[in-house]
Image (cartoon, helix red, strand yellow):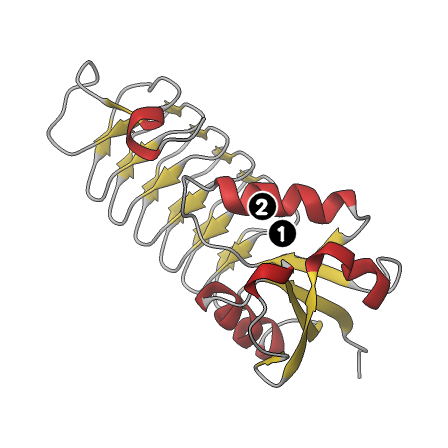
Amino acid sequence: MIEKKKLVIIGIGETANLAYEYFSKDSNFCPLAFSVSKEYIKDCQFRGLPIVPFENLEDFYSPDQYYAFVAISGANLNRDRVKMYEHTKAKGFRCASYVSSRAFVWDNVQIGENCFILENNTLQPFSKVGNNVVMWSGNHLGHQSVIKDGCFITSHVVISGFCEIGENSYLGVNSAIADEIKVAENNFIAMGAIINFNTVPDKMYCPGRTKDMQINTVDYFGVH
Protein backbone atom coordinates (compact mmCIF):
# COMPACT_ATOMS: atom_id res chain seq x y z
CA MET A 1 0.00 0.00 0.00
CA ILE A 2 1.38 3.43 -0.98
CA GLU A 3 1.85 5.77 1.96
CA LYS A 4 -0.13 8.97 1.48
CA LYS A 5 1.57 12.36 1.58
CA LYS A 6 0.73 14.70 4.45
CA LEU A 7 -1.39 17.72 3.51
CA VAL A 8 -2.55 20.97 5.13
CA ILE A 9 -5.52 22.68 3.48
CA ILE A 10 -5.48 26.49 3.50
CA GLY A 11 -9.03 27.73 4.04
CA ILE A 12 -12.16 26.67 5.94
CA GLY A 13 -14.89 27.70 3.49
CA GLU A 14 -16.86 25.55 1.07
CA THR A 15 -13.91 25.21 -1.32
CA ALA A 16 -11.81 23.84 1.54
CA ASN A 17 -14.67 21.54 2.54
CA LEU A 18 -14.79 20.12 -1.00
CA ALA A 19 -11.00 19.90 -1.19
CA TYR A 20 -11.05 17.75 1.94
CA GLU A 21 -13.59 15.41 0.30
CA TYR A 22 -11.67 15.05 -2.95
CA PHE A 23 -8.17 14.76 -1.49
CA SER A 24 -9.31 12.31 1.22
CA LYS A 25 -11.13 9.94 -1.10
CA ASP A 26 -9.45 10.29 -4.48
CA SER A 27 -5.75 11.14 -4.16
CA ASN A 28 -2.46 10.06 -2.67
CA PHE A 29 -2.62 12.92 -0.14
CA CYS A 30 -3.98 12.73 3.40
CA PRO A 31 -5.38 16.00 4.82
CA LEU A 32 -4.29 16.39 8.45
CA ALA A 33 -5.12 20.02 9.28
CA PHE A 34 -6.63 23.28 8.07
CA SER A 35 -5.13 26.75 8.31
CA VAL A 36 -6.48 30.31 8.00
CA SER A 37 -5.49 33.76 9.22
CA LYS A 38 -6.03 34.25 12.95
CA GLU A 39 -8.91 36.66 12.46
CA TYR A 40 -11.03 33.94 10.81
CA ILE A 41 -10.53 31.25 13.46
CA LYS A 42 -13.78 30.89 15.43
CA ASP A 43 -13.36 27.24 16.39
CA CYS A 44 -10.47 24.87 16.99
CA GLN A 45 -11.55 22.26 14.44
CA PHE A 46 -13.01 21.85 10.95
CA ARG A 47 -14.09 18.47 9.58
CA GLY A 48 -12.67 16.96 12.76
CA LEU A 49 -9.17 18.28 12.06
CA PRO A 50 -7.28 21.08 13.84
CA ILE A 51 -7.31 24.66 12.54
CA VAL A 52 -4.01 26.48 12.99
CA PRO A 53 -3.13 30.15 12.35
CA PHE A 54 -1.65 30.71 8.91
CA GLU A 55 0.67 33.38 10.31
CA ASN A 56 2.85 30.70 11.93
CA LEU A 57 1.73 27.60 10.03
CA GLU A 58 5.30 26.41 9.52
CA ASP A 59 5.78 26.19 13.31
CA PHE A 60 3.02 23.56 13.48
CA TYR A 61 3.68 21.72 10.22
CA SER A 62 7.13 21.70 8.66
CA PRO A 63 7.29 22.50 4.93
CA ASP A 64 9.84 19.67 4.66
CA GLN A 65 7.23 17.11 5.72
CA TYR A 66 3.87 18.56 4.69
CA TYR A 67 2.35 19.72 1.42
CA ALA A 68 -0.16 22.57 1.31
CA PHE A 69 -3.20 23.21 -0.83
CA VAL A 70 -4.74 26.70 -1.06
CA ALA A 71 -8.50 26.10 -1.19
CA ILE A 72 -9.98 29.53 -1.85
CA SER A 73 -12.67 30.48 -4.37
CA GLY A 74 -12.36 32.74 -7.41
CA ALA A 75 -13.90 35.71 -5.60
CA ASN A 76 -12.38 39.16 -6.07
CA LEU A 77 -11.29 38.07 -9.57
CA ASN A 78 -9.02 35.35 -8.12
CA ARG A 79 -6.91 37.87 -6.20
CA ASP A 80 -7.51 36.36 -2.75
CA ARG A 81 -6.50 32.89 -3.89
CA VAL A 82 -3.44 34.16 -5.77
CA LYS A 83 -2.22 36.16 -2.75
CA MET A 84 -2.61 33.24 -0.35
CA TYR A 85 -0.85 30.94 -2.80
CA GLU A 86 2.09 33.36 -2.98
CA HIS A 87 2.21 33.62 0.84
CA THR A 88 2.15 29.83 1.14
CA LYS A 89 5.01 29.45 -1.31
CA ALA A 90 6.99 32.13 0.55
CA LYS A 91 6.77 29.94 3.66
CA GLY A 92 8.55 27.18 1.74
CA PHE A 93 5.63 24.79 1.20
CA ARG A 94 5.24 22.58 -1.83
CA CYS A 95 1.69 22.84 -3.11
CA ALA A 96 -0.32 19.76 -4.03
CA SER A 97 -2.61 19.50 -7.04
CA TYR A 98 -5.79 17.48 -7.21
CA VAL A 99 -6.76 15.89 -10.53
CA SER A 100 -9.91 13.79 -10.40
CA SER A 101 -9.64 10.13 -11.35
CA ARG A 102 -12.81 10.80 -13.35
CA ALA A 103 -11.18 13.48 -15.51
CA PHE A 104 -9.81 12.60 -18.95
CA VAL A 105 -6.21 13.85 -19.11
CA TRP A 106 -4.04 12.85 -22.06
CA ASP A 107 -0.61 11.56 -21.11
CA ASN A 108 1.39 14.56 -22.40
CA VAL A 109 -0.73 17.24 -20.71
CA GLN A 110 1.27 19.46 -18.34
CA ILE A 111 -0.34 20.50 -15.03
CA GLY A 112 1.23 22.86 -12.49
CA GLU A 113 0.94 22.92 -8.70
CA ASN A 114 -2.00 23.93 -6.52
CA CYS A 115 -4.44 23.02 -9.27
CA PHE A 116 -7.96 21.72 -8.58
CA ILE A 117 -9.27 19.74 -11.57
CA LEU A 118 -12.59 18.07 -10.89
CA GLU A 119 -14.60 15.29 -12.51
CA ASN A 120 -15.56 15.15 -16.19
CA ASN A 121 -12.95 17.59 -17.39
CA THR A 122 -11.38 16.73 -20.75
CA LEU A 123 -7.78 17.87 -21.28
CA GLN A 124 -6.69 17.07 -24.81
CA PRO A 125 -3.15 16.31 -26.09
CA PHE A 126 -0.40 18.91 -25.71
CA SER A 127 -2.53 21.23 -23.56
CA LYS A 128 -0.97 22.98 -20.55
CA VAL A 129 -2.37 24.14 -17.22
CA GLY A 130 -0.30 26.57 -15.13
CA ASN A 131 -0.04 26.91 -11.36
CA ASN A 132 -2.96 27.65 -9.04
CA VAL A 133 -5.65 26.93 -11.62
CA VAL A 134 -9.18 25.73 -10.80
CA MET A 135 -11.15 23.74 -13.36
CA TRP A 136 -14.55 22.94 -11.90
CA SER A 137 -16.50 19.99 -13.31
CA GLY A 138 -17.30 19.31 -16.96
CA ASN A 139 -14.96 21.56 -18.99
CA HIS A 140 -13.18 20.98 -22.31
CA LEU A 141 -9.58 22.12 -22.85
CA GLY A 142 -8.69 21.73 -26.52
CA HIS A 143 -5.43 20.44 -27.97
CA GLN A 144 -2.40 22.74 -27.80
CA SER A 145 -4.26 25.23 -25.59
CA VAL A 146 -2.75 26.87 -22.52
CA ILE A 147 -4.33 28.07 -19.28
CA LYS A 148 -1.91 30.36 -17.48
CA ASP A 149 -1.43 30.80 -13.72
CA GLY A 150 -4.20 31.82 -11.34
CA CYS A 151 -7.21 31.17 -13.60
CA PHE A 152 -10.64 29.90 -12.54
CA ILE A 153 -12.62 27.88 -15.11
CA THR A 154 -16.13 27.28 -13.76
CA SER A 155 -18.24 24.49 -15.39
CA HIS A 156 -19.16 23.44 -18.93
CA VAL A 157 -16.68 25.88 -20.45
CA VAL A 158 -15.33 25.06 -23.91
CA ILE A 159 -11.80 26.24 -24.68
CA SER A 160 -11.10 25.27 -28.28
CA GLY A 161 -7.75 24.29 -29.78
CA PHE A 162 -4.65 26.53 -29.86
CA CYS A 163 -6.10 29.01 -27.33
CA GLU A 164 -4.37 30.90 -24.54
CA ILE A 165 -6.10 31.98 -21.33
CA GLY A 166 -4.20 34.80 -19.62
CA GLU A 167 -3.21 34.98 -15.97
CA ASN A 168 -5.91 35.35 -13.27
CA SER A 169 -8.80 35.24 -15.72
CA TYR A 170 -12.22 33.87 -14.79
CA LEU A 171 -14.40 31.98 -17.28
CA GLY A 172 -18.08 31.70 -16.37
CA VAL A 173 -20.43 28.74 -16.79
CA ASN A 174 -21.19 27.76 -20.40
CA SER A 175 -18.80 30.30 -21.89
CA ALA A 176 -16.99 29.30 -25.10
CA ILE A 177 -13.66 30.33 -26.59
CA ALA A 178 -13.17 29.85 -30.35
CA ASP A 179 -10.06 28.28 -31.91
CA GLU A 180 -6.76 30.19 -31.74
CA ILE A 181 -8.11 32.94 -29.48
CA LYS A 182 -6.07 34.70 -26.81
CA VAL A 183 -7.94 35.71 -23.67
CA ALA A 184 -5.89 38.41 -21.96
CA GLU A 185 -4.92 38.54 -18.29
CA ASN A 186 -7.42 39.65 -15.64
CA ASN A 187 -10.45 39.04 -17.85
CA PHE A 188 -13.88 38.11 -16.53
CA ILE A 189 -15.72 36.10 -19.17
CA ALA A 190 -19.35 36.11 -18.06
CA MET A 191 -21.74 33.16 -18.08
CA GLY A 192 -22.74 32.16 -21.61
CA ALA A 193 -20.33 34.54 -23.36
CA ILE A 194 -18.91 33.51 -26.75
CA ILE A 195 -15.41 34.84 -27.38
CA ASN A 196 -14.31 34.71 -31.03
CA PHE A 197 -11.82 37.60 -30.93
CA ASN A 198 -8.65 38.29 -28.96
CA THR A 199 -9.44 40.19 -25.77
CA VAL A 200 -7.57 42.96 -23.97
CA PRO A 201 -6.42 42.97 -20.32
CA ASP A 202 -8.60 43.96 -17.36
CA LYS A 203 -11.98 43.67 -19.08
CA MET A 204 -15.31 41.94 -18.47
CA TYR A 205 -16.87 40.31 -21.53
CA CYS A 206 -20.63 39.72 -21.41
CA PRO A 207 -23.02 37.99 -23.85
CA GLY A 208 -24.30 40.31 -26.56
CA ARG A 209 -21.60 42.96 -26.15
CA THR A 210 -19.10 43.68 -28.90
CA LYS A 211 -15.39 43.72 -28.17
CA ASP A 212 -15.48 47.55 -28.13
CA MET A 213 -18.22 47.72 -25.45
CA GLN A 214 -16.68 45.90 -22.50
CA ILE A 215 -16.61 46.71 -18.79
CA ASN A 216 -13.35 47.52 -17.04
CA THR A 217 -12.71 44.96 -14.27
CA VAL A 218 -10.96 47.59 -12.14
CA ASP A 219 -14.18 49.64 -12.09
CA TYR A 220 -16.41 46.61 -11.55
CA PHE A 221 -14.39 44.62 -9.00
CA GLY A 222 -12.19 47.37 -7.57
CA VAL A 223 -9.06 45.27 -8.13
CA HIS A 224 -5.95 45.57 -10.24
Q: Earlier in the sequence, mark 1 or mark 2?
A: 1
Dividing the picture into quarters, in which one does residue 87 lie? top right
Residue appearing at x 55%, y 59% in the figure: 71
Q: Above or below — where is 65 with respect to 125?
A: below
Dividing the picture into quarters, in which one does residue 59 lie? bottom right
On the image, numbered disc 2 is attached to which residue?
Answer: 132
Residue sticking out furthest to the right = 64
On the image, numbered disc 1 is attached to which residue?
Answer: 114
Element carrying mark 1: loop
Counting labels gives 2
- Amino acid type at image mark 1: Asn
Pointer 1 with pointer 2, Cβ within 8 A: yes
- Amino acid type at image mark 2: Asn
Is residue 24 rendered to the left or right of residue 158? right
Residue appearing at x 21%, y 36% in the figure: 193
Residue sticking out furthest to the left = 208
Residue 1 place in picture, x, y as percent: 80, 84
Between 214 and 104, the one lying in front of the other is 214
Question: Label 1: how many residues lie within 10 Å, few (<14), some (14-19) or many (20+)?
Answer: many
Q: Is residue 110 visible?
A: no
Residue appearing at x 81%, y 78% in the figure: 3
Element carrying mark 2: loop
